[in-house]
Amino acid sequence: MQKTLSKTAVASALQRHGFSQAELARQLGVSAQAVSNWIKGDDFPRPDKLLRLAMLLRLKFDELVTQDDENAPIVAFRKRGSAKTTERHLEHARGMGEMLRAVVPYLPPRPFIRPRLDSATTDYAALQRTVSEVRTRLGLVDRAVLHYYHLIGQFKQAGTVLVPVLWGAKQRHENALHIALPADSVTFVFLNLDTGFDDFKFWMAHELAHVYTPHLTGKDEGEDFADAFAGALLFPEACAVEAYADAVRAKRDTTAIGALQKHADSHAISLYSVFCEARKYQRHYKLPAMQIDEAALKKARAAVGSHLVSDALFDLPPPSPKDYVAAAEETFQSDFFAALRTMVREEGFGPSFVRQVLDVSLIDGKALHAELSR
């Protein structure tokens, strides 16, 4: 199925706004014949023209475009807690994906050879072998701590564009958003900086799993694998062996939880992640269970709390647009804002585009647009 404009939606919008095809063509800077070809389905607008068309007609992308199943943006959410992904969330993310197409030409060339995983099983032994191979590639011995720069480097090698965002600590449905554009061979990963340190590394590893297994993105088995992979990558079996041993030696529930917390602190991950990996190890080898009440463990984790990544990055959050962009480029090695800056300056896109492509408030969109326009 070819990607086309919705004739009905365009015709209705033209009538609603009092535009003729000739006037629309003038405002878009194209010929009247080009607009006619788009509407007839003989041609399709380039990403920048598609964006301007959507804004002029005030149509959402899912209203304006009849999607080609093969080339439609593929989205996956790292949800917050028990949040549910609705069709509205999916449509909104796909709309962001269509807008991101316009940014792609301004990105630096992507690596032609990218790291991939052939095996994407959640079987314990097979997953540990997969994780061992990845960690070896990163130069990490069994018990070594995996740092953020390891993850960022892998995203870079995979040609993935990281987009750090400030979406609030509790206001959003997602903590991370993965948008793959198959036709453009580019993946964008939005990471919410307003999340706790002990979870943030897990979410990054989760998203890396999606990057390694693009054929599973957006599928339930892809989410299951990404969760299993993230936990094992951050706290592999060699670490789980020690954590389990420390927990079973403890004589009291609180002492056992404290022993696991020390492992969590040393790896900068959550107490619950350590517990889960130790329990997977115990169950796989059919060892005696750790005498830990899971409800008590979750309560202990909540009592410890976690500083937000944004608090650590910025002295006085929320940061200025300048500091925010600098952190994205320097800390996360993101090419996104350099591309967006060039696009805004050369194509004249306004604050509305910045707001929508980053899914931020109009005030934040205007402030960022002012910074990128300098």
Image (cartoon, helix red, strand yellow):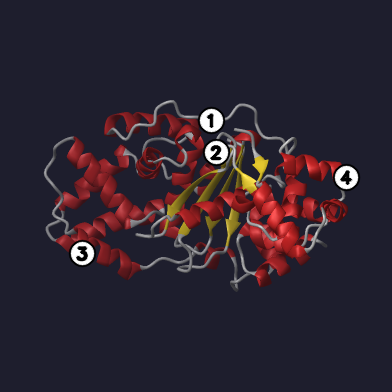
Left or right: residue 221 compared with residue 322 = left
- Tag 4 or tag 2, which sits nearer the N-term? 4
**Residue situated in front as seen by the camera: 97 or 20:** 20
Q: Which residue is mark 1?
A: 115
Judged from the image, the secondary structure of the residue bearing numbered disc 4 is: loop
> What is the CA distance from the residue labelled 4 to the residue labelled 1?
43 Å
Give neighbour class at mark 2: few <14, some 14-19, many 20+ (Cα, 10 Å): many
Q: Which residue is mark 3?
A: 296
Judged from the image, the secondary structure of the residue bearing numbered disc 2 is: helix
Q: Is residue 37 visible?
A: yes
In the rendered image, which quarter is residue 20 located in?
A: bottom right
Left or right: residue 178 compared with residue 22 = left
Q: Which residue is mark 2?
A: 154
> Residue 14 bears which disc, if any?
none
The residue depicted at 37 percent of the width and 57 percent of the height is 265
The residue depicted at 21 percent of the width and 62 percent of the height is 295
Give percent across and percent down for residue 132: 39, 31
Left or right: residue 16 compared with residue 176 = right
Give percent across and percent down for residue 280: 24, 42
> Residue 31 bears which disc, if any?
4
Give percent across and percent down for residue 357: 65, 56
Check the picture and name the quadrant holding the C terminus: bottom right
Judged from the image, the secondary structure of the residue bearing numbered disc 3 is: helix
